[in-house]
Image (cartoon, coloured by chain):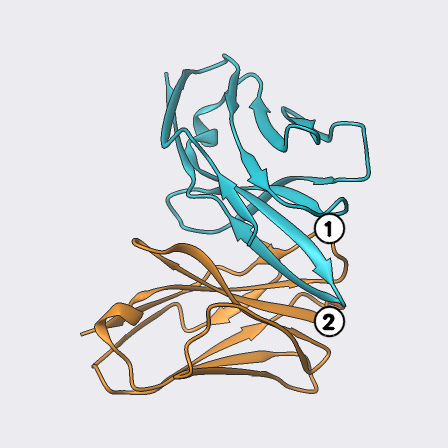
Amino acid sequence: DSGVTQTPKHLITATGQRVTLRCSPRSGDLSVYWYQQSLDQGLQFLIQYYNGEERAKGNILERFSAQQFPDLHSELNLSSLELGDSALYFCASSRSYNEQFFGPGTRLTVL
Amino acid sequence: AQTVTQSQPEMSVQEAETVTLSCTYDTSESDYYLFWYKQPPSRQMILVIRQEAYKQQNATENRFSVNFQKAAKSFSLKISDSQLGDAAMYFCAYSEIIQGAQKLVFGQGTRLTINP
């Protein structure tokens, strides 16, 4: 158990819908990262937050957005969902540069 | 852009034997971090071992060790005394720090099978 929690574990929704994925980092970790794992794209970095502020952006679609709240938990919002958004979404957290600990992931299925 | 290449899509090893997984990366930076992650069938991403580029000494964690060749941009993972529980996908990852921003760039993974 990495200490990073993600909810929900599974999410099934329809095209065009909007969903919110939630992540609670390890106690004391100020950085939160979001990654997408799909069969065709592999593991891709989406976005990083540090203590509530956006620090880095990767291949995140405009339909996706994220934020980190004062209690350091983070949410990833996915809107106007398409079939190709079906993937495993990971959250990771860290307190130093030589580590990133991953949560169990949220499996999103778009029908 | 930085890239990470794992040239072995699949590897297999006999239980109790030693196996080495390969990873190469491309960067123009001198300071960065390298990681190996394990992803078992549960899909959890588990940090196996990490290496800071400024450290010449190869990292070791119990049965896991790395061979870090900075000039060759190579970062291989050696698993000694392989166990059935080592069966998983293994991902090599690279990271650099730019103004406090950090992201992991992953290779495509190597699927490791342990034969009893």
Mark 2: amino acid: Leu
Mark 1: amino acid: Asn
- The chain holding disc 2 is A
> Picture coordinates of residue A84 (x, y %)?
26, 69
**Residue at left 81%, top 39%?**
B54
Give left or right: position of A69 versus A75: right
Give left or right: position of B31 versus B42: right
Chain letter corresponding to the colour cyan: B
Residue at mark 2: A30
Nearer-N-terminus badge (1/2): 2
**Residue at left 61%, top 30%?**
B74
Quarter assignment of residue A74:
bottom right
> Which of A38/B94 is in front?
B94
> Which of A88/A26 is in front?
A88
- The chain holding disc 1 is A
Crowding at mark 2 (Cα within 10 Å: few <14, some 14-19, many 20+): some
> Helix, strand or loop at disc 1?
loop
Residue at mark 1: A98
